[in-house]
Image (cartoon, coloured by chain):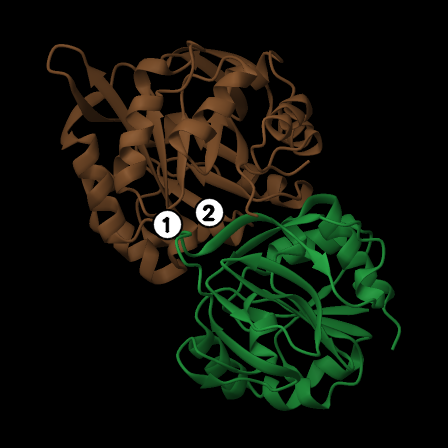
Amino acid sequence: MLSKRIIPCLDVKNGQVVKGVKFKQHEIVGEILELAALYSQAGADELVFYEISASVEKRLLDVNWVRDIARHIDIPFCVAGGIKSVADAAKVLEQGADKISINSPAIARPELIKELHDEFGKQCVVVGIDSFFDANTGEYLVYQLTGDPNSASQTRYKTSEWVQRVQDLGAGEIVLNCMNQDGVRKGYDIEQLSNIRKQCDVPLIASGGAGVMQDFVDVFQQADVDGALAASVFHKQLIEIDALKQYLAANKVPCRL
Amino acid sequence: MIAIINTGCANINSVRFAFERLGVNPEVIRDPAQLKQFDRAVLPGVGHASVAMKRLRDLGWDKAIAEYQNPLMGICLGMQLLCDETEEGNVQCLGQIPGKVSYLKTGQLTSPHMGWNTLSVCKAHPLTQGLSPDEQVYFVHSFAHASNASTLVESEYGTRFSAVVAKDNYAGMQFHPEKSAKVGATLLNNFLNWQL
């Protein structure tokens, strides 16, 4: 049976891993390669690296660390940050990344998803979506350029519309970042993820809100996501990945031990 | 010396790095005439089968691979290219591994088959040494080889299919051993130690 994936996310800024709360106030967590090695040895199923300042600064991420990761890490990894074209994606994939994830550049130019799909295949193309729940209107809205609070802005899309659109264009996987939950460790947004799951035929990865091990069990069992992404609980060593895997297995969530 | 065959349509680096982590330095080769100088060879592959097959034939790899006497292993699409034929683009393949590659019928499950899945060994072979029951490896594919006499290891995703195959000096792994953590390293090491 296919395992549910545990995916530590490493936000990269100036060559180091950082962590913010609700996408703000970034603090340095550690060296990229050190953390990547630690997590992969502990049993992470996949890693996501996201160079948060790239899109905001309108440049491609630094591909040098991508090559270092590929050289030393023996699990799949996905890279995000300022990938705006097939040529950009090729530079990242050539270094040994397994997938590329795009977010703001796809909102600026949705055809990019199709171009990447046609060139590299569906399995390479991950679309990250930053979804914000507006309590005033009761709607889930897509945000862009969330790497820097000064540039973050609402887009013209409702989350469910954008999820449909990116699938139609050839996205092979969707990472749904539930912004209201990000970094606050109160659990994943099960309601939103369950709703998106119903319209999502490609792998769906939950992001934002993991606080305790039961949150992972809940999101797999109640929202039926394929993977759960988390950052602060791993960076702050609130949850050890090997213990989490044992906990998932004890709760009958299929996983790799 | 081990060669990695570069036909220009696969990510060579991941496979090269995986062997480097095992302490060997593979040489990436682009000319079929070089192949026979190597003790063993790997045929990686990502992308579309018809494009990759055309490139193999245009460059003369089909003949060089058919004449090769030492262990040669295909990875992912590389494994499928070693089989008789594939449904992906309906092309004839290299024909070193008996059997046909077809679209993986996943039923209700999402396609492609992507992620960590369990292996079950069906035949003892030097390539599968040291594999414990229920080990998991990383798959990314939508087409698969139907199990037959050349199947050493199976996996299941909607349908059972070949995860590892071997015939004579040719072998293939449908998953990505280079991305499959310790289990992948064990399997690549088995390939390095495989004596015919």
Give the letter of the chain under mark 2: A
Chain for colour green? B
Residue A14 seen from this side: no
Q: Could you tell me which residue is drawn at 32 percent across and 30 percent down? A: A194
The quarter of the image holding the N terminus of chain B is bottom right
Crowding around mark 1 (Cα neighbors within 10 Å: few <14, some 14 to 19, many 20+) is: many
Image vertical order of residue B117 relative to residue A180, above or below: below
Q: Are marks 2 and 1 in contact (CB under 8 Å)?
A: yes
Please give the residue where the numbered disc 2 appears in the rendered image. Answer: A99
- Which numbered disc flags the more N-terminal residue, 2 or 1? 2
For marks 2 and 1, give the one nearer the viewer: 1
Crowding around mark 2 (Cα neighbors within 10 Å: few <14, some 14 to 19, many 20+) is: many
Horizontally, is A248 left or right of A229 in the view? right
Q: What residue type is labelled 2?
A: Lys
Give x and y (percent) for residue B94: 59, 85
The quarter of the image holding the C terminus of chain B is bottom right
Residue A172 got which mark?
1
Q: Quadrant of residue B145?
A: bottom right
Image vertical order of residue A136 relative to residue B67, above or below: above
Give the letter of the chain under mark 1: A
In space, the residues marked 2 and 1 are separated at their CA atoms by: 10 Å
Image vertical order of residue A152 relative to residue A99, above or below: above
Secondary element under disc 1, as helix, strand or loop, is: loop
Q: Nearer the viewer, residue A77 or A200?
A: A200
Give x and y (percent) for residue A23: 36, 16
Horizontally, is A39 left or right of B56 in the view? right
Tally of marks: 2
Chain for colour brown? A
Q: In which quarter of the image is residue A133?
A: top left
Q: Could you tell me which residue is drawn at 21 percent across and 51 percent down? A: A111
Q: What residue type is labelled 1?
A: Gly
Give x and y (percent) for residue A5: 53, 36
